[in-house]
Image (cartoon, grey):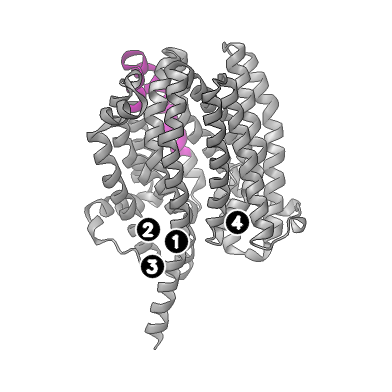
Amino acid sequence: MLKKILSLHLHKGFLRYWKNFSWLMAEKILRMFVGLTVGVWVARYLGPEQYGLLSYAQSFVFIFSALSTLGLDSIIVRELIKDDSRRDLILGTGFYLKLVATILVLPILVVTVSFSDNDFETNLLILIIFSSTLFQSVNVIDYFCQSTVMSKYVAYANSISLFFSSIAKVIFIIYQFPLIAFAALVVFDAVVVSIGLLFFYQKRLKLSLQSWSFDFQVAKSLLKYSWPMILSGIVLTIQARIDQVMIKQMVGNTEVGYYSVAMRLIELFAFIPIILKDTLYPSIQNAKAYSVDLYTHRLLNFYRLNFILFIITAVPIYLFSEFLVVFLFGEAYRPAGILLALMAIRLFFANMGVARGAFITAENLFKFSLLTMITGTVVNITLNYFLIMKYQAIGAVIATIISFFITIYLLDYIYSKTRRNVVLQIKSIFTFYKINVRS
């Protein structure tokens, strides 16, 4: 009887996580479809040079936006899972912390761009795009939905934003709007998503924003755990975006355009591991408190799932990379084909790195994670300096692959507390066919 009840409980739990994953996947598939239509149209309209400039501005802002997140994303999710009775205190405190941090980062950005060698148009693009981060404090609602496995409301908000943004892009192209208008759309997207999250939180979840409150002790507790994540977020963002910044400075906007197109196509598939992590992390965290064996088993299956996703997505991309680029973006972007093929290999480290993040959070190994990220970023920047000069954007992709290997595998194997996790990852590669998604 007990076995039957347990089996029923596991079945219901599986269905709950599967529904959550399905909602997020549906929204991303919709975004993928739009990216292959409207997004491609935008890239063709702007051309490699202007598209590269827009991508450079977004990458520049992305590096600074890591400061304003305060590394609170996974911390808030974890704390809500542990004690949902403090929901309003955690959400309210997280909201105000992120808002104040964004306001404080703004003058730092202004000073930085004023001393850069960018022209006026580039700096204006950067400032406009950065203003979108003022609305990211509302994302605490997203973290709440992750903790309660109700991310369908986040999918709703993102889909609404995508709909209006796509219409605006088509209008901008038809009436030949300048580049700055497309930068303004980044802000528009952030506003619509924020309004959507606020609406669904109050009207669908029947929860009150008026109940949110700031608590100094809660803030102190969140920041105590998040400060390594703040630095980790900055370092990880630099590692992820410094390529485009360095390519622009060392080679030019056109090469950034090629790199950005390849990256855009890869990101159409790279979102899947992130959705899986957001959906399945609560089950991994709960398993840790229940049973070491169940916790290990779920981690192993999580790695297996991410490796399978790598095989399914990377092989077709590698084989048809140049065809995909030319077919979608036109002959002007043909040089991006080889970049896309190399980025398909990079997907392996990206998938396993995201999955590793669940282990890092569950084990509270944020300080070690910070050390590995700093090391990987230093390696990445150093290799970029030498490889971009010789191989241009291809060198940047190679540098990233090497730095990911060092961050995810080499340093983790050296450290005793993470060595068993590396073994789990390697085991998952050779036993991927044994995956048990209902475990």
> What's the magenta region?
371-397
Identify the secondary structure beneath mark 1: helix
Marks 2 and 1: in contact by CB < 8 Å? Answer: yes
Q: Is residue 133 visible?
A: yes
According to the picture, the residue beneath numbered tag 2 turns out to be 299
According to the picture, the residue beneath numbered tag 3 turns out to be 294
C-alpha span from label 4 to label 2: 23 Å
Identify the secondary structure beneath mark 3: helix
Image coordinates for residue 64, horizontal then vertical, percent: 59, 30
Assess disc 3: are there few (<14), some (14-19) or many (≥20) residues with their C-alpha within 10 Å of its C-alpha. Answer: some
Marks 2 and 4: in contact by CB < 8 Å? Answer: no
Amino acid marked by disc 4: Phe
C-alpha span from label 4 to label 3: 25 Å
Image coordinates for residue 328, horizontal then vertical, percent: 35, 29
Q: Residue at x 24, y 61 (%)?
A: 434
Amino acid marked by disc 3: Leu
Q: Residue at x 66, y 43 (%)?
A: 137
Q: If you read the primary sequence from the N terminus, does the residue marked by circle 4 or circle 3 appear first?
A: 4
Q: If you read the primary sequence from the N terminus, does the residue marked by circle 3 or circle 2 appear first?
A: 3
